[in-house]
Image: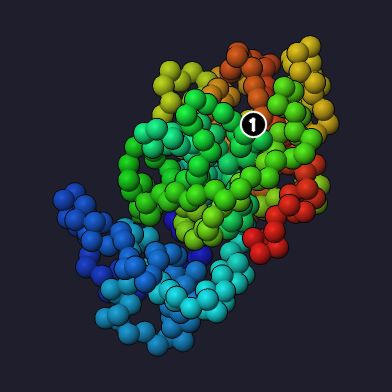
């Protein structure tokens, strides 16, 4: 596994490794180094150096003050992350936001690994949808969504409108891989702590029918912009009609077929797209299946069973991932052969999504 970027990232990593203290194999030293460098001062944020125009320009001009650049490293050694200075005045914030958008490509992970790699940073496009208990403040995450801009999360309408005793839709959590650790680490780097962001308001498709799951799609508009990092990136939406490939993956947190307990890690389940008629055969007697839906799964022992509501179904085209589906509902016979799950066909709602995202949030 390695970071994308070829020689560019190699040069940056060599530079940072040269300037920082070398890590040994001693676990105690590694842990101590992580605690010292994982966080940045309040006037900066930990991002990929390619996303920090100030430091990137310095490196590009080959005018490097080694004693200063070395102190700006954050995350685990070799992560390629630096503490990027930020500014308080609104003009600079706007300019920085525009630069971030220009430099960010949707649907791409900063991690380059084997085809089946699903570790930290492989799918940074997903977010957990949180509901807060009004009595004790506890937050639970029964649903998943996807990051489609720095201010908007795409999910299922039944998640956005879910109701449970004393629980209310409250926030989304981005940048998470493991749910049982504060800082998630892989073999070669550690990510930033997951971040909880409050929800400003919800946009639900006007045709949504909770009894039949028709038009089961919604947008969660956040109270503040997301900062893109190695573990927080936007997914691509199909600009034109995109046919799913054999490389389709459902990503989220929940229980998959054959699992007794919900594991703490983000899971990716490879599911094939099947003919819509197969879902009509399975569900048609109880729920209507329309052309606005996708049918995926049906392989024995491979399906999402619970906790994946609103999760994105991704397909890969070239170097980028595109979201083609939103998990809507499935069968109690989770993982049974010939029993697929039903998804919202995102391709049918591209125009609705564009029309309902404020221009400033694109």
In the figure, residue 247 lies in which quadrant? top right
Q: Which residue is depicted at the point 79% across and 11% down? A: 285
Q: Is residue 68 left or right of residue 151?
A: left
Q: Residue 266: horizontal and vertical position, in percent?
A: 46, 37
The residue shown at (58%, 58%) is 150
Would residue 8 be visible to someone looking at this image?
no
Q: Give the class, few, some or many, for how many residues have Cα within 10 Å of label 1's Cα (few <14, many ≥20).
A: many
Element carrying mark 1:
helix
View extreme (front): residue: 135
Compared across the picture, whether 272 is left or right of 186 comes to right
Query: Does the image show residue 126?
Result: yes
Depth check, front residue: 154 or 299: 154
Label 1 sits on residue: 158
- Marks counted in the figure total 1
Looking at the image, which residue is at 43% across and 43% down? 177
> Which of the pair 60/304 is nearer the observer?
304
Residue displayed at 52% across by 76% down: 90
Quadrant where the C terminus is found in the figure:
bottom right
Residue 305, how many percent across, how many down?
55, 22
- Above or below for 122 versus 307: below
Q: Is residue 104 above or below residue 58?
A: above
- In the rendered structure, the answer to whether residue 95 lies left or right of residue 291 reads left
In the displayed structure, would residue 353 be above or below residue 48? Answer: above
Task: Tell which residue pokes out farthest to the right in this image.
Answer: 291
Type of colouring: rainbow
Q: Nearer the viewer, residue 352 or 345?
A: 352
Name the residue nearer the viewer: 70 or 24: 70
Which percent across, then down, holds residue 287? 76, 18
Residue 206's x, y, as percent?
Answer: 77, 39
């Amino acid at each position: 596994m390695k970071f994308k970027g070829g020689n560019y990232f190699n040069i940056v990593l060599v530079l940072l490794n040269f300037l920082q203290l070398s890590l040994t194999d001693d676990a105690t030293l590694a842990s101590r180094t992580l605690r010292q460098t994982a966080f940045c001062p309040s006037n900066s944020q930990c991002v990929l150096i390619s996303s920090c125009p100030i430091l990137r320009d310095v490196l590009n001009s080959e005018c490097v003050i080694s004693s200063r650049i070395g102190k700006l490293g954050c995350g685990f050694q070799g992560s390629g992350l630096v503490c990027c200075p930020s500014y308080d005045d609104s003009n600079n914030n706007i300019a920085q936001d525009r630069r971030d958008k220009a430099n960010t490509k949707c649907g791409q992970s900063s991690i380059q690994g084997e085809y089946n790699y699903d570790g930290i940073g492989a799918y940074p496009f997903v977010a957990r949808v949180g509901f807060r208990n009004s009595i004790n403040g506890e937050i639970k995450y029964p649903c998943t969504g996807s990051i489609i801009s720095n201010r908007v999360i795409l999910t299922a309408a039944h998640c956005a409108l879910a109701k449970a005793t004393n629980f209310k839709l409250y926030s989304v959590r981005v940048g998470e891989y493991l749910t049982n650790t504060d800082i998630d680490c892989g073999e070669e780097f550690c990510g930033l702590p997951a971040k909880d962001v409050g929800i400003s308001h919800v946009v639900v498709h006007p045709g949504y029918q909770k009894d039949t799951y028709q038009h089961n799609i919604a947008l969660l508009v956040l109270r503040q912009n997301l900062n893109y990092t190695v573990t927080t990136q936007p997914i691509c939406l199909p600009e034109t009609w995109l046919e799913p490939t054999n490389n389709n993956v459902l990503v989220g947190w929940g229980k998959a077929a054959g699992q007794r307990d919900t594991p703490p890690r983000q899971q990716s389940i490879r599911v094939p797209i099947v003919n819509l008629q197969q879902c009509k055969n399975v569900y048609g007697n109880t729920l209507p299946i329309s052309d606005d839906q996708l049918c995926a799964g049906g392989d024995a022992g491979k399906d999402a069973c619970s906790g994946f509501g609103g999760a994105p179904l991704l397909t890969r085209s070239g170097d980028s991932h595109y979201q083609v589906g939103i998990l809507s509902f499935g069968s109690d016979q989770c993982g049974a052969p010939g029993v697929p799950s039903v998804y919202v066909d995102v391709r049918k709602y591209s125009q609705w999504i564009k029309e309902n995202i404020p221009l400033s949030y694109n």
